[in-house]
Amino acid sequence: MAKKINIALVGNPNSGKSSLFNYLTGLNQQVGNFPGVTVDKKMGQSRISEALSATIIDLPGTYSLYPKRADEWVAYRVLLGQDDAIKPDMVLLVADASNLKRNLLFCSQIIDLNIPVVVALTMMDLAKRKGTQIDIPGLERELGVPIVPVNPRKNKGIDQLKKVIDQSAGHLYQPPPRDFIDTHELAPNAIEEVKKHYPEISNYTAVHYLINHEQFLLKHGMQETIEQIEVDNKFNPTKTQAEEIMQRYGHIKHIMQQTVIEADPLQKALFTERLDDVLLHRRWGYLILLSVLFLLFQSVFWVAKYPMDGIEWAFGELGGMLSNSLPQAWWSDLLINGVVAGLSGIVIFIPQIMILFGLITILEDTGYMARISFLTDKLMRKVGLNGKSVMPMISGFACAVPAIMTARNIENKKERLLTIMVTPLMSCSARLPVYTILIALVIPSKLYFGFLSLQGLVMMVLYLLGTVLALIVAWVMKWFIKSAERSFFILELPTYRAPRWKNALTTMIEKAKIFVFDAGKVIMMISLLLWALSTYGPKQKMANVTAKYEQLIKANPQQTDELNKQRKTELLQSSYAGILGKSIEPAIRPLGYDWKIGIALITSFAAREVFVGTMATLYSVGEDADENNTTLRQKMAAAVRQDGSKVYNLATGLSLLMFYVIAMQCMSTLAVVKRETKSWKWPIIQLVYMTGLAYLLSWVVYRIFI
């Protein structure tokens, strides 16, 4: 039976840790939360050798063993043995070869904890391009731990890394015979006193007991004992920490001189630096950013148009074929107007979702996403946020739920809360199907200069509108949410890299699966429920409508077709769905909406994309067989009010788009806001202000364009 061990995967941010974790664990991953804190805990299983398997714990990235943020405290507690749930047998430390001096600080601290350590040296190709040469055997001798160069992106060095881990687990590699620095001399008497109570810990661990014992899980009475040791020995945490860091960098400098050859610093700037001179320019940088976003949303229409048209045609033909071949029965009506109509509202948007997420993944992979944070920090600060708020907000273009969770990395509590409160205003992928069908209904399909799509421009405006409103709301809220904390924005810009096309393709497929199987299940359930609510109603009321039109048809046989259409319309209005829609119609009529739109607004609270499935069902129930091969867009475009005017005119379409840009229609988002803020106060405020603002601005838009 294979031996099992726990490996803590640690490293600086942007060192390649996540890529290595993904490669080692593949699909055998679990994501949860560390006990007591809302910080992601990623764990995965990896087969190291025939005789060894490992649970790899991907700890949050950190620069040193002096934590400041909540996620850094998580990694710190695990490494110091203060997490009861996770006890690592070994540390796999990922170090960036192109920034070796900075990475060696954290590495040296881990070594001095006297935990078995294996170093995975990443970014060797980038170091080589910088002109940096590293004597790896010499570096191993100086540090006293095994070092393996790896490149997870190209599957280089992974087999050797597993071999070294296996050997380390078999104790073929021993801990370094000496500390990286003489930690005992930092506070000799105090360290000795602590080790009398904890003889198993290293000298350096004892230093951390002295500095951070208030945050440790110690047995009864030990907090007071260590506090007294500090007093008796006049232990100064700040002075000790500063002295330690100075000594470490002094030793690192010596090691670098012995084992690393670096290029002349006056050498011509690297490609990354030259590119940053353009992309981060104080004027051109913002213009380039807008151009990138413009191309992103244009592509969603350009590229997706053809597969979407094909899917729409296929479902129209399928509906017509089933109508002509199946007998008239309740089950055939359920199949055609419930199942097929619901499926069409799911599948048709897969191309756009895949393209959007594929392009976002490419932007992240190339390193440009981090530049967006840098460019927007100045603007963010003016509204009460900081540059780190940009990443949750950009992630909100995909889904507000994980985006709100990424706000945990914002140290300042006020800025974190503001980010959480405005992130749902960003247009998530659930809004994309709604935008697509409404834009197609009310915005002409025009091209300017032969390539600029008017519909794509409107799509971009909707996304920018959500962003602008988020900034305005943040600016208003910052006056009501008080905090005395100071805010800092420190960001490491990753180097530019060629995108991993395989990674982008994998992401596109995964996001499509999530949409089909997660959102799709909700859409199908609501579509089937709506079919039932739209087909059935109070027995007496439905019977009266049927009797009324039977008499009219007998009296006017020449108008049978027209009367049948009127009968089906009135039956739909008399159904349970019709009664529900009619009851809320007075409240939404000022926005230009009818009762069918009202039902869609209610069902959208489960998930915004359900709007399309709701429309597909409501406009399919009660139609004639020869109408089943018409597309949803055609059905909605043909919809008229009692006075004969179009339901989806420009004013109603724009008003509805405005409502979906702003309104809080997602139960999952409210639930995660409650979880992150640990209070129902903030999700309730969020629901009220977003719904109220959506109603007001939708009314204004409708009155302007009516």
Image (spheres, helix red, strand yellow):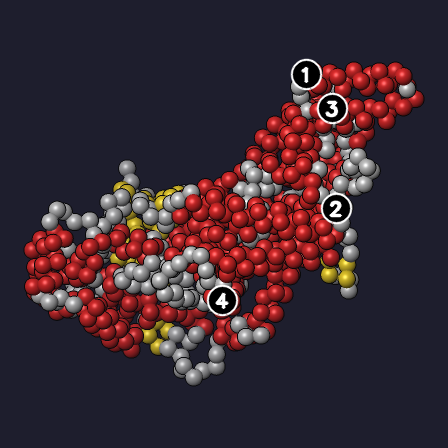
Q: CA distance from mark 4 to mark 2?
A: 38 Å
Vertical side of 622 occupied by 73: above or below: below
Q: Which residue is mark 3?
A: 571
Q: Secondary structure at mark 4?
A: helix
Q: Is the residue under label 3 in contact with that under label 2 (CB below 8 Å)?
A: no
Vertical side of 484 occupied by 645: above or below: above
Vertical side of 507 occupied by 270: above or below: below
Q: Is the residue under label 2 in contact with that under label 4 (CB below 8 Å)?
A: no
Q: Which residue is mark 1?
A: 539
Q: Secondary structure at mark 3?
A: helix
Within 10 angstroms of label 4, few (less than 14), some, or many (20 or more) residues? few
Q: Which residue is mark 4?
A: 382
Q: Secondary structure at mark 2?
A: helix
Residue 261: image quadrant is bottom left
Q: Of callouts 3 and 1, which one flags the residue occurring earlier in the amino acid sequence?
A: 1
Mark yes or no: residue 464 visible.
yes
Q: Quadrant of the N terminus?
A: top left
Q: CA distance from mark 1 to mark 2?
A: 36 Å
Q: Residue at x 25, y 48 (%)?
A: 83
Query: Mark 4 or mark 2, which is nearer to you?
Result: 4
Q: Which residue is mark 2?
A: 441
Vertical side of 547 occupied by 454: above or below: below
Mark yes or no: residue 145 visible.
no
Within 10 angstroms of label 3, few (less than 14), some, or many (20 or more) residues? many
Q: CA distance from mark 3 to mark 4?
A: 55 Å
